[in-house]
Image: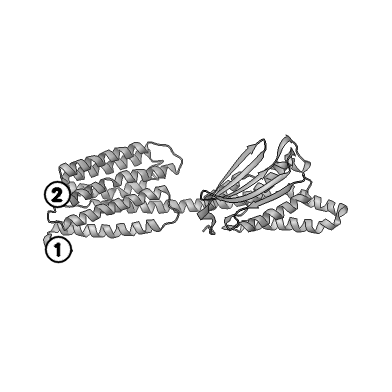
Amino acid sequence: MDRIFEQYSDYYTLTNIIFVLVSMILTIVVLLVSIQMKNHSRRMGWFIAAVCVNMGGLAFQLQSMSSEQYTGSKYVIASWVMYAFVAPLFGLYFIETERSEGQEWDGYFWTIFQCLIAVLVIGFSVYGGSRFLANIFFLIQYIVVMVMLMISSKSIKASLGFITGLIAPISTSLVGIGDSRFELAGFGLILFLLTVFFGYQMDTEKDLLTSQVELSENKVSLLMEQIHPHFIYNSLQQIALLCDEDPGSVKNAIFSFSGYLRKNFESLTNDGMIPFEQEMEHVDTYIELAEILPSRNFHVHKDFEVTDFYLPALTVQPLVENAIYYGIGMSTEGDDIRISTRREGGFIIIAVSDGGHGKQTKLATQKKHKSVGTKNVKTRLSIMCKGELSINKSPEGTDSIIKIPEMMAVQPNKQK
C-alpha cells in the first residue's frame, strides 16, 4: 500500500484509492450479511453473485493501482469486465423479484440485452482500452436497467427504491465520461447494491408480516371448520344417548370429547412446530371420539418409519377426520385407514390413506358436516415449514400426502 501512495500521489489516484477501499469495506459487509441470512432464495443467490462480481472488480482495480503500468493494464481491463456483468446479474435478480409476485413479463429480453452490452464493454476494453468508452457503455447499461424497471415492473412505486439507487452508478459514469481519470464505477455499483439489499430486507419483513396475519386467520378458520356447532351438538347428543344405552362408556366419551376440544383450542396459541408424537396424540383423541359417534366401523393402521420430526399443529388430524367421514364414511366398501411416515428424497413424508370406494352413502350425522378444508392445511404447511399437501383420489380410495423438507422438520421452526 505504501508503494501505491509513493508511486501515485496525485489527486486523482488518491481519490480513486479512497473510493475503492471504502467500496471494498462496504462490499465485504454486505456480502457477509447476505451469506449469513437464513433460507436463501434464488433471488438472493443472484444478488450475492452480483456482490461477488463487484468485489472482483474492486480487487482488480486496486491491483491495477499498484501495477507498474497503471494505464491500460490487464487489471484495469479485468475490473471493467467484472463491472460490466453486475447489471445482467441484477436483471436476473429482478426477474425472480417479479416472478415471486406471479407476474409473467419480458425480463429475459432485458437481461440478454444487458449481456450484449457487457460483451461490447469487454470488446472495447480488450482492443481499445478507452476509459471514456467504458464509462459510456456503463452509462448505457444503467439507463437500460432504469428503462426495464419503468416498463416491466409491476408498478413504478414498487421499483422506486431501485430507480433511486441507480442515481449512484449513473452519476459515477457521468463523472468518468467528464474526466476519465476518475474511476468510481465500483463505488457507484456498491451503493446501488446496498439499495437493492435494503429493498430485499423491506420485502422480507413485509412478507413475514403478511404471512403472520395469514397464518393467524388460517388458524381461526381451521378451528371453526373443525369445531362447528353442528359437530359439538351431535357429539353431546350421542354422549347423552350413551347414558341410557351404555352408561359405562359415558366417562370415557366425555374425556375424549374434552380432550379433543382442548387440543384444538391449544392450537390457537401454538405459533411454532410441534413434535410428530404430539400431533398423533391429538389424532388418537379424535379417533376415540369418532368411535362413539354413529359412523361406519373403521380400523386405523399405523406404519411409522420415522417419528423424530416436527410439523405444524393440526395438519394430520384434519386429514384423518376427512378419511373417516368422507373416505370410508361415505362408501359401502373399505374400512381401513392407514397413517404412515417415511424419509424420501430429502423430505419427511406423512401419508393418510383410506379404502373408501364403491357405492357412496351418507350418514345422518354427515348431512351438514362439511369437509375440513385442506386449503388451510396447505397454507399452514407452506408458511411454517415450506411443506406441501397433495390429495390423490382413485377408485381404490384417497391418499393425502404431506411433504416437509427434512431440514425444516428436524428442528423446531418457530414463527416470530
For label 1, the residue is 3
- Do we see residue 324 in this rendering? no
Residues 248 and 193: in front is 248
Give the residue type that dot 2 points to.
Gly
**Local crowd size for mark 1, using a 10 Å CA cut-off: few (<14), some (14–19), many (≥20):** few
Return the x and y of residue 309 as percentages of the image width and height. 57, 57
How was this image coloured?
one colour
Residues 272 and 180: in front is 272
Give the residue type that dot 1 points to.
Arg
Q: How many marks?
A: 2
Return the x and y of residue 204 as percentages of the image width and height. 44, 52
Q: Residue at x 36, y 50 (%)?
A: 47
**Local crowd size for mark 2, using a 10 Å CA cut-off: few (<14), some (14–19), many (≥20):** some
Return the x and y of residue 407 as percentages of the image width and height. 50, 55
Horizontal arrangement in the rendering, residue 211 relative to residue 196 (left or right): right
Q: Residue at x 22, y 48 (%)?
A: 80
Q: Residue at x 36, y 43 (%)?
A: 92
Q: Secondary structure at mark 2?
A: loop
Q: Secondary structure at mark 1?
A: helix
For label 2, the residue is 72
Dot 1 or dot 2, earlier in sequence? 1
Which quadrant would residue 395 be assigned to in this image? Answer: top right
Which residue occupies the extreme right position in the image? 244
Which residue occupies the extreme bottom position in the image? 2
Vertical placement of residue 36 versus 180, above or below: below
> Residue 45 has which mark?
none
